[in-house]
Image: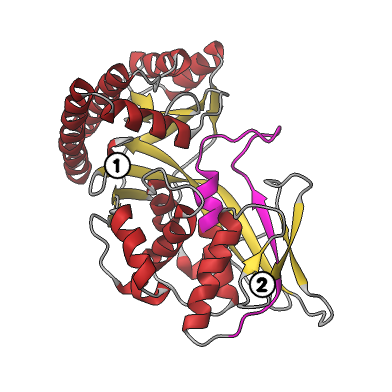
Amino acid sequence: MTAGRTVSDGAVSRRAPGKLYVAGEYAVVEPGHRAVLVAVNRFITVTVSPVHDSGRRSGRIASSLYAGGTRSWRRRPEDGTALVEGAPVDYVLSAIRLVESLVRERGGELRLFDLDVDSQLDDASGRKLGLGSSAAVTVATVRSVAAFYGLRLTDTEVYKLCLLASDSVEPIGSAGDLAASTFTGWVDYSSPDRIWMREERVERSVDDMLLADWPGLRIERLEPPVGVDLLVGWTGDPASTAGLVADVQHGAHSAAPAALDYEEFLAGSQACLAGLVRSMESGDLDAVAARVQEDRTLLAGLAASTGVTIETPLLTRLVEIAREHGAAAKSSGAGGGDCGIALCPPHVDERAILAGWMAVGVVPLDLAVHTRDPRTEDR
C-alpha cells in the first residue's frame, strides 16, 4: 500500500518512519536535555477506513502487534470514548482517543471506522529491530485518524498529541522517538517536562495543550552531515527500552555517589551534544566523529556508575570493527542489545565494515535516513 495517499471510499493512509539515536541517550530523559536522532526508511503504515454499514456498532483494529491479529472496538455509550473490551489501552487506542477528543472540541462528529496497521519495523520472524515501533505506530495513527476527520496539524501538534497519547501507556522515556518519527530527517531534540505536561493536561483542553509552550521542549531539523553515510547493525537481541531506562534512573538516584556521577553525565552530555550539532553545521567531519566517540565514553561511565549494561559484548565488537576501518561508531538507543551505528566519511571501506559485522554475528540493516515530504505523503 502506498502510504500517505487517500485509498478508496473515504479511507486514508499515513505512515511514520522508524528511528535511531545518534547521541544523547539517557540524558535526554531529563527535561530540557538534548539528543540527536535520525528517522530511517522503514515504516509503520496505518489505514483508516469508514464503516458504511449502519447496522455495525463496532470497528476493527487489525495489527500483527495483537495476538490473533485483530481487535474490535466500540464507543462507550455515555460519552462516545473508544474502547476495547477486556484489553488495556495501547498506543493505537490512546492515539485514537486523543485525536477524537480534539475533533469533539472543534465541533466535529465522531464516526465509526476500521483501522489497519502494517509494520516494516521487525524481521521476518516478527522480532522488533529496535527502530521505535511504539512511537511509529502512535505517529502513524495520529496522522491517519486526524486526516480521516479532516484535521490539519503541524508537526509540533502531531508530536504533542502523540506524547499525550503515549504517556498514558508508557510514562518512562524521553519521547525522542516520537520527535524523530514526526519531524523525520536528522533531528535535534530536547525533551519536555512531563510533570508539567501531566499537571496542565488535567486543567486544559487538548486544543489548549497544543497551543501551549511546553517547558524544555525543542525540536529542530538538522542539515545532514555532507559526505557521511550511516551504517546500521542489529545484534539480533531485542532490548526493553523502558526497562533499561528505569534501571538507569534507579541506579542514578539511589545513592549519593551515583547521583553525583549522574549530574556529571548530564552536564557532559549537554556539552557533547552542543558540540556535535556545531560540528554538523560547520561540516567538520572529524569533530562529528570525536563527539560521537565522546558520547560513547559518557554512556560507558553511566553504565559503570549504575550497574546497567548499555553496550553489550556484541555491540562492542560492532563498534571496534567500524573504528578499525575509520568510522565513528556507538550503540544506538537504550543499548542492552538492539542496534549500533557507524558514521562513515568518504574514505571508509563500508563493505569491509559490513563483512566484519556479519563475521561476528551482527546483521547489517539496509537503512537510509528518511525525510518526509508532505506534498506526497499527505495526499
- Tag 2: amino acid: Arg
Q: Is residue 293 left or right of residue 157?
A: left
The x, y position of residue 308, in whole percent, is: 38, 21
Q: Would you call the spot at circle 2 few (<14 residues within 10 Å), some (14-19), or many (20 or more)?
A: few
The x, y position of residue 188, in whole percent, is: 28, 49
The C terminus, quarter of image: bottom right
Asked if 343 appears above or below 200 in the picture, the reply is: above
- Which residue is farthest front? 78
- Which residue position holds label 2? 76
Q: Over which residues does the magenta segment extend?
A: 109-138
Say whether marks 1 and 2 touch (CB < 8 Å): no
Residue at x 76% of width, y 75% of height = 51
- Which residue position holds label 1? 28
Q: CA separation, marks 1 and 2?
A: 38 Å
**137 drawn magenta:** yes
Q: Is residue 351 left or right of residue 330?
A: right
Asked if 255 appears above or below 158 in the picture, the reply is: above
Residue at x 33% of width, y 53% of height = 194
Quarter assignment of residue 2: bottom right
Asked if 179 appears above or below 152 in the picture, the reply is: above
